[in-house]
Amino acid sequence: MAEVVLRNVEKRFGKIQALRGITLEVRDGEFLVLLGPTGAGKTTTLRIVSGLEEPDQGDVFIDGVRMNGIAPRDRNCAFVFQNYVLYPHLTVYDNLAFPLRSKLWRVEENEIRKRVEHVARVLRIEHLLGRRPDKLSGGEQQRVALGRAMVRNPKVFLMDEPLSNLDAKLREEMRVELKSLQKNLGATFFFVTHDHVEAMTLGDRVAVLHQGVLQQVGTPEEVYDYPANVFVARFVGNPEINLLEGFPEGKRLFLKGLSLLVDLEKVWEGGELPPRVLVGIRPENILLGQGETSGEIYLVEDLGVDTIVRLRVGEVILRVRVPKEAKFAVGDRVPYRVMQEKLLFFDPITEKRLGGAL
Amino acid sequence: MVWKVTKSILIVLALVFFLLPIYWIVATSFKQWPDIFAIPPKFTFRGTFVHYLTLFNIRPEEAAKFGQVGKSLFPPRFLNSIVIAGVSTALSVALGTFSAYAFSRFRVRGENDLLFFILSTRMLPPVVVGIPFFVVYRALGLIDTHIGLILLYMTFNLSFSVWLMKGFIDEIPKEFEEAALVDGYTRFEAFFKVVLPQALSGIAATAVFCLIAAWNEFFFALILTSERARTAPPSIAAIQGTSGINWGQIAAGVTVFLLPVVVFTFLVRKYLARGLTFGVIKR
Amino acid sequence: MEKVRLENLSKRFGTFEAVRDVTLEVFEGEFVVFLGPSGCGKTTTLRMIAGLEKPTRGEIFIAGKRVTPLPPARRNIAFVFQNYALYPHMTAFENIAFPLEAQGIPREEVRKRVQEVARVLGLEHLLHLRPAQLSSGDMQKVALGRAMVRRPQVFLMDEPLSGLDAKHREEMRAELKRLHMEIQATTIYVTHDQIEAMSMADRIVVMNEGTVQQVGSPREVYLSPENLFVAHFIGSPGMNFIPLVFLGKNQGFRLENGDIVRHEVLEELAMRHGVRECILGIRPEFLSIGVSGEIRGSIVSVEPLGYKNLYAVEIAPGRIIRVEDMRRERFSGNVSLGVHWEAACLFDRETGQRMRWEHG
């Protein structure tokens, strides 16, 4: 097992700058998730670590060794692709054995058999060894792909959205399996996804990437509670964070839209605020049924476990997460209260979060 | 029910329409001399192998009856056809697959221009380049050589083979090789272990097309060869006796000539069906 | 008032029975969602209602009229496709106007109706653009507009949001629901996404392997699933299943780890049904992490969602259940789970059906 370090990595494809100055460390035995929307450069980053792409600038280290210019096969990484890429002309057994049959390792067939069978047992695919990939369900294919990565005991597992082709139910189950697999192997996982729920739930740490620039690296809680900027705040969390304009006036802050005055002395410890700020309020930090001001229920979405209410206050529609017992009907007027100590402040120009820890 | 019957009838009609010429040739090759010219045509007749026997010089004494002078030249020319068509097909498919792989996987400078140039070699009608080729071949001493025709057929089929194979290889996700690269294989090994097995159906389809084109080629075989390297098509057409065209032997020659292509296509039919529908059906 | 009625609708493709005996009524103004995994027959059912597929057996009535033999054009329905199916060479305006022009409606009238639809959908400023110039969300709105402009009897929608990315999907979901509240059009909507179904439907029709598993309001299918399939499919993650052996009244149930749990009401229920091998169904939010609960287990992993944590707890070798917790701190190690019994369901392990009071 090993750590991966990227230092100032730049990559350009023609006119498109895919990655800008990426510096990132995946620690030994860590599950690091690289999160970002389509086109953010996540897959490129992973391919640079694997050696399938070379960076234009910057260095890649695996286990302390500089990897620039070293062929993929000599890096001892395993790559799990989004579409699994199981070889259709080989059985599951031969697919699993494939990496071991490279001349590079010179593994004997006896040893190969032992290792393939061990991996198959761990992943509970022993009964599938004789089949061809096209006879497998999506979940089974996914397991075989994982097995092909595990069989070699690589230094690092690189995973490119490996769960995104599974249906929702299976994805939830594979999430738990993958996480406990990683813990049991004690392996270093570098995992790419565009799904923030997947990122939060799987990652020891989450790195958020947007337009080739690393936005924030932190634990799931850090990323959720203290997003580095507006992009991270909006991308992580479901439903999306509420963003309003705020105008500091001395010791108070006027929240436009809600016509609410916030006592800055209680909620703000940083220095002076700019004359205009963006204020972020997570949907669970608005409480319905209490408070002095009120709004009109615009829409109620009962998702079973959660209920999402859209509350209209003047021109603004707030997304509010309410307890599952709560009952609201469209058109009701309901008092609400904003949990002011949970407010997040962003600079409207740089979009960076202002003040506070981290 | 009505539709089923109509459908069956339509199928039978189509079969008759398409197979009649073939039946005609095959039947003629087994007919006695007078039956060949009978009007109305005879559908029942006493068969004979005489045309085949004379074609392969097994009973040369019979040949004289039809006015044939000397030995039949069909056997060596048939062999020429097999060698020339076979080798040129193997070469154009092999070269085509490699170039197609390069075009499909690497960033080739001027890729589109090159591909168009390759395709453009196919646009010229053979007749136009017949004379130049003759002059060049004479200067190079390639007239009436096997290697001369093999090179020519290979060149003509290459454009076709590159384009067809590029389509097939484009359909194979590049992640397949990348997985192998990460798993400890070289690019070359990855090509043979991963890409080639999956491209087999495409290769079969391409080979059939190349083989048929080379097998049937008449014009260049006629002008660039005379004796040693002459292939079957011009030689069948030239089967003539002193008493006119020897239709029986021509029919026998054509029937024999048909067989290899039928057999080859039959052998690769499993890949062919998949190859021809490749890209049409979403996998 | 009833708007659409399906009677014993079945469809067979070769030897494959795609849809089996679907009988259902959809009422005027109702938003009904067909929900199920891929291949469950939901889209085939929708296509039969539209007339794009001919039923092998059964009848379809729209607005009281039998339409089974009629072609799609004569059923007065609108169909919104997954991939929008907009005409790329026409502007948004022309796309929306297209169905009206097919009917030969005068141009002034067409203009008025397109503009009205565009206003409802918030598309007025985009009418001059072609599909390629629109975002995927706006393309789907244009497709909706094309459906609305004809004022059909019924809207049929086949996974209309699945082409959008997560954020847009959330927004469109809300907009679509709000739109339905305003125009009150009878809608039959097909999706595999249970969140879409839960948030938008008046009633959900859960399908699996060609048959209807349950019809009910989102609350009903969520809290009282008829069988294990519905219980597992609805919810994210689905309901936890805990195998129990019923030992007898006043003796309780035995868990896989040998512990006994007692609950008088459920014992009575199992007694009435005479079932020994049961499955306790309980949703993650109705379990609580503590030290003095009924079910012992150890925490395998924590999945933080920001506003709550989802725990994977192993309660017997290989038996992992999910538990939700709203507290910020992360727990680990051995725990004892409390069960909110009022939200528990008891299933017959053999049939997979929920045991109900009215039977047995």
Image (cartoon, coloured by chain):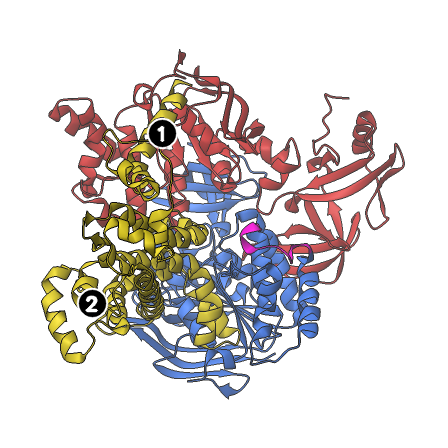
**Percent coordinates x, y for residue C185 in the rendering:** 36, 25
Identify the secondary structure beneath mark 1: helix
Q: Give the vertical position of C208 relative to B233 (above or below).
A: above
The yellow-tinted chain is B
Display colour for chain C: red
The numbered disc on residue B12 is 1
Which labelled disc corresponds to residue B226?
Answer: 2
Q: What residue is rendered at 50% in x and 40% in y? A: C38
Give a yes or no on whether discs 2 and 1 share a subunit: yes
Residue A255, quarter of the rendered image: bottom left
The region drawn magenta spans A127-137
**Residue situated in front as seen by the camera: A342 or A206:** A206
Q: Is residue C203 above or below residue A265?
A: above
For chain A, the rendered hue is blue
Density class for disc 1 (Cα within 10 Å; few <14, some 14-19, many ≥20) is few
Amino acid at pointer 1 = Val
Q: Is residue C6 magenta?
A: no
For the image, the number of numbered tags is 2
